[in-house]
Image: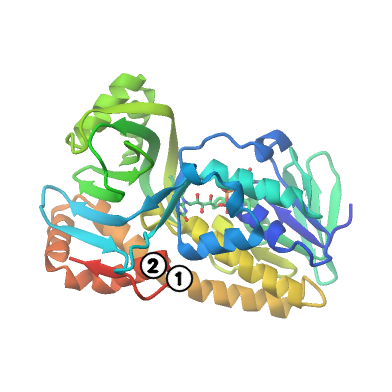
Amino acid sequence: MDTDVAIIGAGPAGLALACALDGSGLRVTLLERAPDAAVADPAFDGREIALTHRSQAILRGLGAWDRIPAEQTAPLREAKVVNGASPLALRFAPGGDGEPLGRLVPNHLIRRALFETASGTQARLVGGRAVTALALAPEGARVTLDGGEVVSARVVVAADSRFSEARRRAGIGAEMLDFGRTMIVARMAHDAPHGGIATEWFGHGQTIAMLPLNGAMSSVVLTLPPAEADAAMALPPEDFAAEVTGRYQSRLGPMRAVGTRHAYPLVATYAHRFAGRRFALLGDAAVGMHPVTAHGFNFGLSGAEMLAGEIRRASDPGAAAGLLRYASAHRRATLPLFLATNAVARLYSDDRAPARLARAALIGAGAVLAPVRRVIVAGLMDAPRATARG
Ligand SMILES: Cc1cc2nc3c(=O)[nH]c(=O)nc-3n(C[C@H](O)[C@H](O)[C@H](O)COP(=O)(O)OP(=O)(O)OC[C@H]3O[C@@H](n4cnc5c(N)ncnc54)[C@H](O)[C@@H]3O)c2cc1C
């Protein structure tokens, strides 16, 4: 099979790139390990993605935003970070124009909308086939699929998750920061109103976040040592609800579990390079963020927009100059927040006494963390008008 752009991975980043290449005249082929049906109609995976205003605009431009039912998205009006029993909180709030920080959108609906959009383009999906080999040569690339079929491409884009096999096959290493924790995500119904405020609460031995969904419902994000997470995953729904209610100290009243629970290992990754010979990395395969600052997919979308621009402008979509421009621009756009996020995550998940003291002091002093907060909020709003309050 011959193609111009082979995209490995039809997750949200790979699909977004396929959509962004619509109308370019290039043949685009998505190579995906999961079967076609799972790509077309992805199951709920527990992730509620906080989409920035810029990401919403990119999705709108691609034609995907209007495919997401508006009533399934929820405004994120404010975010606050609480440390242990301290009454003080770090607050992230938008400017005074009433615009929310962003919108929370279920990941599977983003994926479905992007798939529907991509289906209306020239892009072709080859589902149910894993990539087993990759050869990158100056004149072109060859991707081998299980079953032995070879796809010849002018450029290969790997969007095959933070544990990208294609990245490794291309000889590109990555920084991997394993936090030694597992995140459990699940929807919880409750009686008290959340006011559209997301809360990240760093208790001792646990981190618990509540993301405000529509109505009296929140998404709990519970970060625990793996053995405790396994035990929590094994609880019957009522016991899990009681566990979350207790861990959250009934701040939203008694909770009831709604739907399925999902567990994710907490590992942040950052590729050493984002481009190689006839090869580029996109989405989590390039930058696998710690979810605490809610930027992973936002970076995937802005990266897809940037890479599509370079590929469209080049006479050869695999030409080194365009891929390198994408690589350095995407690095500049992501590295400061990747480092700031890890610093915050490490400080707040460390239960040793010096770290506990340090974060109490930092939250108390408020202003000390202002640069980090500014980066985070400006990233969320994609604008300098956001404010961060102590
Ligand atoms: C709990 C949680 C909460 C999050 N919250 C936010 C948030 O609020 N805001 C935000 O911006 N981001 C958030 N993220 C991050 C966001 O979910 C990811 O950044 C995004 O899903 C990455 O998309 P992707 O397409 O790069 O990778 P993935 O979604 O991992 O998709 C990769 C695709 O590649 C396929 N694949 C893998 N290997 C192969 C292979 N060898 N051959 C073929 N196909 C292959 C997989 O089947 C999959 O379809 C969160 C993540 C988690 C875990």
- 228 to 136, vertically: above or below: above
Q: Position of residue 177 (x, y in %)?
A: 42, 56
Side of 137 relative to 355 (left or right): right
| Residue 76 in view, yes or no | yes
Q: Position of residue 382 (x, y in %)?
A: 44, 70
Mark linked to residue 260: none
Q: Residue at x 68, y 73 (%)?
A: 309
Residue 40 sits in which quadrant?
Answer: top right
Q: Quadrant of the C terminus?
A: bottom left
* Of the pair 332 and 310, the residue shown nearer to us: 310
Which residue has dot 1 on it?
335
Amino acid type indicated by mark 2: Leu
| Residue 10 in view, yes or no | no
Question: Are the two marked residues, 1 and 2, in contact with CB atoms closer than 8 angstroms?
Answer: yes
Bin the neighbour count of mark 2 within 10 Å (Cα to Cα): few under 14, some 14-19, many 20 and up.
few
Dot 1 falls on a residue whose secondary structure is: helix
Side of 149 relative to 321 (left or right): right
Which residue has dot 2 on it?
339
Q: CA distance from mark 1 to mark 2?
A: 6 Å
* Of the pair 12 and 171, the residue shown nearer to us: 12
Amino acid type indicated by mark 1: Leu
Whether the residue under disc 2 has CB within 8 Å of ligand 1: no
Q: Residue at x 75, y 48 (%)?
A: 119
Side of 65 relative to 77 (left or right): right
